[in-house]
Image: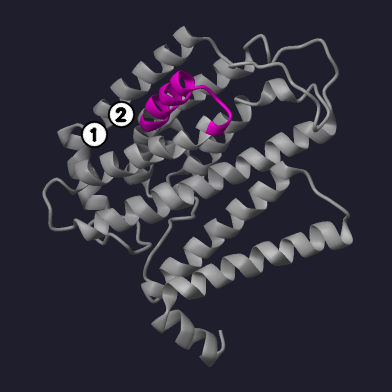
Amino acid sequence: MTKAMRKLADKHALIFWILCVLIFVVGYKFISVGLLGSTPYEYDVAFFKLSLALLAILMMKTLYQGQFCFHFRKDNFLKALILQWPALLFVLANLLSPGSLSENAIVPETLVMVLVANMITGFYEEVIMRGMLLGHMMEHWKNDDRKILKSVLTTSILFGLVHLGNLVQAGLISTLFQVCYATIFGLIFAAAYLRTKNLWACVLIHGLVDVSGEMYTIYYVPGAEIPSFAGVGLLMILLCTVICLIVALFEFRKKKRTEILELWRDDMTCSVA
């Protein structure tokens, strides 16, 4: 980073990061439109999310002088996967739903787009919600006896509220329902992250949840009109949500909270307790 850039980042951080986002987006559009002709909307959104995630990582590293850790590592990866088993149950239910199982031929282009767009979404949301916000709140409330409760509830509720954006393409009731179960799923992701300090496992499971929710679209070419399909049935969603809530409460019981406090005693560092 040049001296001028560092000076701008230090004195006008918000302006600096906004400029970085604009540069990323404009650069991408120049390549995609100027050189490739055009790209699907899903790829445009995915690249924008990826840019924001990478900028968030850079921003936190800069602000904390390299001390803030997002815990991208292999330690406790399997344990973190196992802790998220209720989310895997939801993935399985989606994959076995009538819309995902079809006799029609899979469209490779759509399949790749679904995988890329949703895995990037999982990466983006986990970096922001768990890696940045949850990690920062654990540091911000480090002297508060209720820091785990406050950090987990705040980030999980925010994660749920983000899904209000789906109002532009879905009904009010279905959107509010999604907000509710996304909040509960946020508890599971938070439990796995806080108990293992492993963000990769959360990214993977989150991405798989999103991918499985759109598997019914892989039988249609990009841009085609796709029949409205809600994925798994309401009862299955309710069942998975209730299971997630019960498991989350179990994972945050007093004994496990003590273990989390020990693991996160050096909140922002990359150490493994």
Instruction: List the residue tagged with mark 2.
Output: 248
Please state which of residues 77 and 177 is positioned toward the viewer in this rendering: 177
Residue 173 shown left or right of residue 225 in the figure: left
Which residue range is magenta in the image? Answer: 168-183
The reply to whether residue 66 is in sight is no
Label count reads 2
Which amino acid, by three-letter code, is at mark 2?
A: Ala
Q: Nearer the viewer, residue 254 or 157?
A: 157
Look at the picture and state if 75 lies above or below 170. below
Q: Position of residue 31 (x, y in %)?
A: 80, 63
- Residue 120, given in percent of the width and then of the height, sits at 61, 46
Q: Main secondary structure of the magenta part?
A: helix
Which residue occupies 46% across, 23% down? 172
Q: Quadrant of residue 258?
A: top left
Taking depth in this image into account, of 72 and 31 the one nearest to the observer is: 31
Q: Which residue is mark 1?
A: 252
* In magenta segment, residue 172: yes
Horizontal side, residue 227 vs residue 56: left or right? right
How far from the left and from the top, in percent, is residue 23?
64, 70
Give above or below for 239 relative to 153. Answer: above
